[in-house]
Amino acid sequence: MNRKTSVIWDYFTVIESDKAKCGFYKTVLKFNQSSTTNLLRHIKSKHPTTDLSKRSRPNFDVEENNPDDPSSNNGNLSASTSSNSGVVSTSTSNRDRSPLLRRQPSSSICPQQCQISNYFSKPITASKRQLIDQQTCYMLAHSLNLIVQSSLDQIKETRVKVKSIVEYFKRSTLATEKLNQMQEQLGYSPVHTLIQDVVTRWNSTFHMFQRFFELKSPILSSLADLNYDVSLTSDDWQIISKSCNILKQFEEITFEMSSEKGVTISKTILFTQALINFCNKLMTQHQTIPCIDSFIHKLTEETNKIFGQLEKDML
């Protein structure tokens, strides 16, 4: 067989004529005899810290002499077994090798053992370290989205009411004009429009609640003039207000992790620890509205479950 000169063969083992197995996750991928693009794409996407700049050593096929294979005829490691005593003796040159290799029986050493050293840790470049930090930040931002989305179900009734009112103003030109007139009459400057939430982004619900509460007086006046049949109770307005105060902390941290280029893993640990402390503090406060109490309990539970062991896992 011909020698494979590409650096990719330091991390893959050929198992069939068109298939190779990844040395990290044992994933089997197809490849073309004249191209290893598919294998390179796998390493770059799944193992971004892998150094593909150069090969650490030539990668020989099994048929060639392997310096780590006791069955090889290489002079550096010759083994002879006495037919009388059954004791394995090695040459003097083998004394320089690792004691672990000297203790291994010849039948247990893999013919491709020389590739083990290819998986030793290598220095991580600054660009790859930055890539790891960015991927960690994206992961934490996604986790925050899951935490808050699951917790918002506790105030679903109020959320649905607010969303239906916002949709009404978005659909009706007459309602929009009435809301703008009310803002001008009550001295709101500049005139704002309502914000509709998006299912995939929890902070859109925060912005919807925040804008809705800011325009409370113009909205109530407009709905009264338009005879709109959906009404909000005093408890609904308290839920909107308290939810904004709670979610504001999550919004600030999400914004920092999503927009700042210099966020590192250590900084994300500080962010998540601040969220845990904030939620635990909320648990000690008495809430008069059952929905808000359930919302805080769910938020605290999910935050501690996902971020509680983050520092230990990263270190």
Image (cartoon, rainbow, N blue to C red):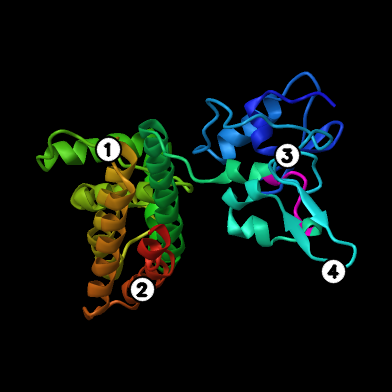
Q: Residue at x 38, y 59 (%)?
A: 315
Find out whether residue 86 is within the magenta segment: no
Q: Residues within 10 Å of mark 3 (few under 14, many from 20)?
A: few
Q: Which residue is mark 4?
A: 85
| Image quadrant assignment for residue 185 | top left
Q: Residue furthest left?
A: 187
Which comes sooner in the sequence, label 2 or label 1?
A: 1
What residue is at 28 percent from the left and 63 percent from the top? 273
Q: Is residue 181 left or right of residue 112?
A: left
Tally of numbered discs: 4
**Which mark's residue is nearer the viewer, 4 or 3?**
4
Asked whether the residues under the numbered discs 4 and 1 touch, taking CB atoms below 8 Å apart as contact, a structural biologist would say no
Q: Which residue is mark 2?
A: 291
| Residue bearing mark 1 | 262
Q: Report helix, strand or loop for mark 4.
A: loop
Residue 228 percent location from the top left of the image: 37, 52
Q: In terms of image quadrants, where is residue 85?
A: bottom right
Residue under pointer 3: 75
Instruction: Looking at the image, tell me whether mark 3 or mark 1 is earlier in sequence order.
Output: 3
Q: Residues within 10 Å of mark 1 (few under 14, many from 20)?
A: few
Question: In the rendered view, would you say 214 is above or below 43?
Answer: below
Per the rendered image, the range of residues in magenta is 108-113
Residue 24 seen by the camera? no
Evaluate if marks 3 and 1 touch, with contact meaning CB atoms under 8 Å apart: no
- The local crowd at label 4, few if under 14, some if 14 to 19, many if 20 or more residues have their Cα within 10 Å, is few
What separation in Å lies between label 4 and label 3 (alpha carbons)?
A: 23 Å
